Amino acid sequence: MISVQNHQLRSSGNRLFFVLILGVFFFLGACSPKTRVLKSPDHGGGNVGGTLPKEEKPEITDKEETAEDARRAEAARNSVTLVLPFQLDKIAPHTLSKEDVNRSAIALDFYQGFQLGLDELAQKGRSFSLNVVDSRDNELHNQSIARSEDVTNAALIVGPVFPKEITTFGTHRSNKKVLQVNPLAATKARDFNLPNLVSLTPSIDVHTKAMAKRVAHDYKTGDVVIIYNTSDNDGKQFLSGFLSELKSANSSVQVRSVSSIPQLNEQISLTGTNLVVAGTTDRFQLRSFVSNLEIKSSEEFYTFRVYGHPLWDRIDFSIYERFGDFQPVITTESHMKAWTRAAKEFKDQYYSLYGVNPSDYSYKGYDAARYFGNLLAKYGDDYPAHITKEKFEGLFSTYTFDYNEGWGFVNNAVSFKNYQGSSFQLK
């Protein structure tokens, strides 16, 4: 399951065109609360929380100059390089198309959110230098930029985004002491095998483990857990290792595994609750599965609780009259509570700057900047030693990291959504 997906052009497309045109020629390389410096992603740089250009400076005292030197030194220490797939090399500025905007939307949204996060820290007195590099979604180009000065001298690298880029970039970096953040891809960290990688998006095995613990917690004596196996890839990935994780969480659980509707009907129990775990996202299989539960619950006094794949959040279950009766639960990486004051303020600020509402990628960029920017500001070069100790609750993301010597830091923070009304919602 990969979280990075193609964006559709949003209704405020003209504003995106305007922002992207700026990106082609200049792009925002740095900013302060008062001043923004526009530079190309391939030559980005500057101070976040920096100063006015020299020609605009009023005369300053020795004391003020000392403070400015300190800010510059702090910015140099807190050097962040963003490596994102803007793919500006594929854009012809005079014939800019919707395809060009869509192709760069993921990178643009994440970048804009990240910039706002650093701005927020800068307004609190912190200083950073931010370099923005276009990865071009090109493996050969990633080999080159992995050895570039901006990457070699960075205190933190965020990106690239797509799995092949991440692997190529990570294996060709000359300075492997610096952490590389995988900001969006939900690929299992062990598949990258990069010891200094920080994976922000929980992979499917993290969801599986969390769901197994949830089912074990909900289980009561007399209940039965039924694992409904299907042949589709999402179903197989989600249920891989589920049984062992369930037994590890509660060894007394009574479990039955089935792979068809007739087998399911043979194993359901009239006594206790049937805790049915299904990983399929196939529409046809889901229709057969849910319709069967509706029929069985109307025929006899069966009690069902359903636990599903995180991608069920994207499926319309309102076509099933009794789906909500099964108290469906799914895992989710999103902790987004749009009704909170902080979320509303960010959305308003983002819209006022860019003319569009933030996407999930915007929120993720904002959260990543706040978390890692704060770690850099607090601990300097020693910040990696605090990643497993410092938990974080952002607008969209929550971070709780474990460390493995083979594949780095893995975020294990997922939440649960319950089906209410006609959709899955956070409690």
Image (tube, helix red, strand yellow):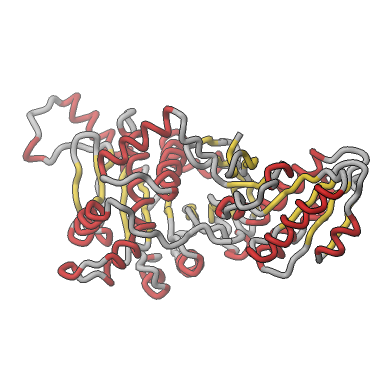
Identify the residue at the far bottom of this view. Answer: 140
Quadrant for residue 113, please give it: top left
Name the residue located 64 percent from the left edge and 47 percent from the top edge.
331
Is 66 drawn above or below residue 79 in the view shown? Answer: above
Q: Quadrant of the C terminus?
A: top right
Q: Front-most of 25 and 281?
A: 281
In-image side of 19 versus 388 (left or right):
left
Identify the residue at the far front of this view. Answer: 299
Quadrant for residue 8, please give it: bottom left
x and y percentages locating residue 340 in the rendered image:
46, 29
| Whether residue 416 can be seen here | no
Q: In which quarter of the image is the N terminus?
A: bottom right
Name the residue located 19 percent from the left edge and 24 percent from the top edge.
63
In-image side of 148 versus 403 (left or right):
left
x and y percentages locating residue 271 in the rendered image:
93, 43
| Whether residue 159 can be seen here | yes
x and y percentages locating residue 15 in the rendered image:
23, 51
Name the residue located 72 percent from the left edge and 49 percent from the top edge.
307
Quadrant for residue 234, please give it: bottom right
Name the residue located 42 percent from the left edge and 44 percent from the top edge.
363
x and y percentages locating residue 423 in the rendered image:
58, 44
Q: Front-most of 59 and 372?
A: 372
**How many numbered marks are there?**
0
